Image (spheres, grey):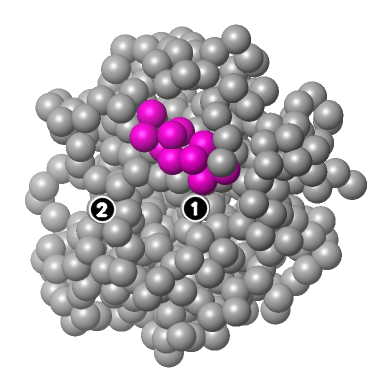
Amino acid sequence: MTKIYIAGIAMTVFGRHFERSLDDLAGEALRGALEDAGCSADAVRAAFYAGITNGALQGQMSIPGQVVFSKTGIEGIPVFNVENACASGSTAVHLAVQHLKAGACDVALALGAEKMNVEDKAKSFALFNAGWDVSRVDENFATLAKLGEGIEPPPGSESDRPYSRFMKIYAAFCRHHMKTYGTTQRQIAAVSSKNHLHSAYNPYSQFRQSFTIEEILAAPPITYPITLPMCAPISDGAAAAILCTEEGLERIGADRDRCIRIAASVIRSFTHRRADQPEQSIGRLAALQAYEQAGLGPQDMHVAEVHDASAMGEIIQAENLGLARLGEGGPAAERGEFTLGGRIPINTSGGLESKGHPLGATGIGQLYELVTQLRGEAGVRQVPGAHHAIQENGGGLQGVEEAALAIHILSKT
């Protein structure tokens, strides 16, 4: 089997960058990744661009990758534009891996970039309405909202301010888990508190303020049991990775001690499973496939980055990845098992809810954190002895789960 490595990776600070353009953010990430890999743009033989907002917010409906790359020194090579909702960045990496394994080239680039903060906030919020079957919006919403039935939201737990309709769906997922397994709002708040604590140590995070569990619970409500700090913000940012075969590493003269091997790369799409079939969830099936591909298991993982567009996502995905048993994610979080110094630290970056969530850049940003951990370069947030890491990144909704989901397992060489 052809071995694939991340030779260079970089990201911008995620946040609200009103003064910066999409091209500027993408250029910073690209230059950082090239410098990290120790090569020039001329070394790249294929490029995969992940971006969702280019058309809706910048008017670049087609060829966004070619346009962005033309301003950052990448031209004359195959460029592929990737859209897979919030899993777009991870999908770009996956496709780059397949391109390299097929022998089409020896050095490939995956780059995700978004400029989501614009003057018209309604346009930014409207982006999320495209993350499911737009011909069946009311049916989709009714199906997913029904998952939350059986738990009555307490008075005062619903915001009177506008927010994405998807937050009601995330809340429904929360309440379904609560009534099925006994998960509590405090346990969900423990995840959020932990991630905001981690992000305080991450210079690339959008938010760097820690909160106690009590402060999370007392924060402005969104919709029960979700409060504001439990939610990912609207973010601008970019992230890029240089991927190589063994031959590619030799050609660019990469520092082999800092190259991280991609032990598994998996993409799956939703199925029409029922909500009472968690063992058939897309995340669980993708994780099993990735573990088999890597020849490893959940017990071998030392650190994880998972998709927490709301804090509940971390609990669900920790269970899907086998890092906690079904129904045990909430108690494990409350016990501190997912915190730095705990049994299996999760979202040491701060996660989407604190580090930020610039859709197409999110997955590569997750991989940046894991590469940094495996290199032993994470500073205060370093997980001692980290050798294997797992990433999960979902996008869109169909049925009762993500429309697309990516998993990568990384290992020290």
Q: Is residue 400 above or below residue 154?
A: above
Report if residue 171 is visible in the image: no
Q: Is residue 26 above or below residue 381?
A: above
Does 144 appear in magenta? no
Please name whichever residue, 377 or 266, is drawn nearer the observer in this view of the structure: 377
**Location of the C terminus (image quadrant):** bottom right
> Where is residue 196 shown, x and y percent of the image?
28, 69
Q: Earlier in the sequence, mark 1 or mark 2?
A: 2
Report if residue 75 is visible in the image: yes
- Amino acid type shown at disc 2: Gln
Label 2: how many Cα within 10 Å (few below 14, some 14–19, many 20+)? many
In this picture, residue 52 sits left or right of residue 57:
right
Point out the stretch of residues depicted in magenta: 27-37
Does 29 appear in magenta? yes
Give SS at disc 2: loop
Res. 412 image quadrant: bottom right
> Where is residue 55 shown, x and y percent of the image?
37, 17
Query: Residue placed at 55% from the left, 58% from the top?
Result: 371
Extreme-bottom residue of the structure: 335
Query: Residue placed at 85% from the left, 44% from the top?
Result: 2
> Where is residue 300 shown, x and y percent of the image?
71, 75
- Amino acid type shown at disc 1: Tyr
Q: For marks 1 and 2, give the CA distance.
A: 15 Å
Q: Are marks 1 and 2 in contact (CB under 8 Å)?
A: no
Give SS at disc 1: helix
Query: Residue placed at 29% from the left, 74% from the top?
Result: 197
Res. 78 image quadrant: top right
Query: Residue placed at 24% from the left, 80% from the top?
Result: 213
Residue linked to disc 1: 368
Residue linked to disc 2: 206
In this picture, residue 238 sits left or right of residue 304:
left
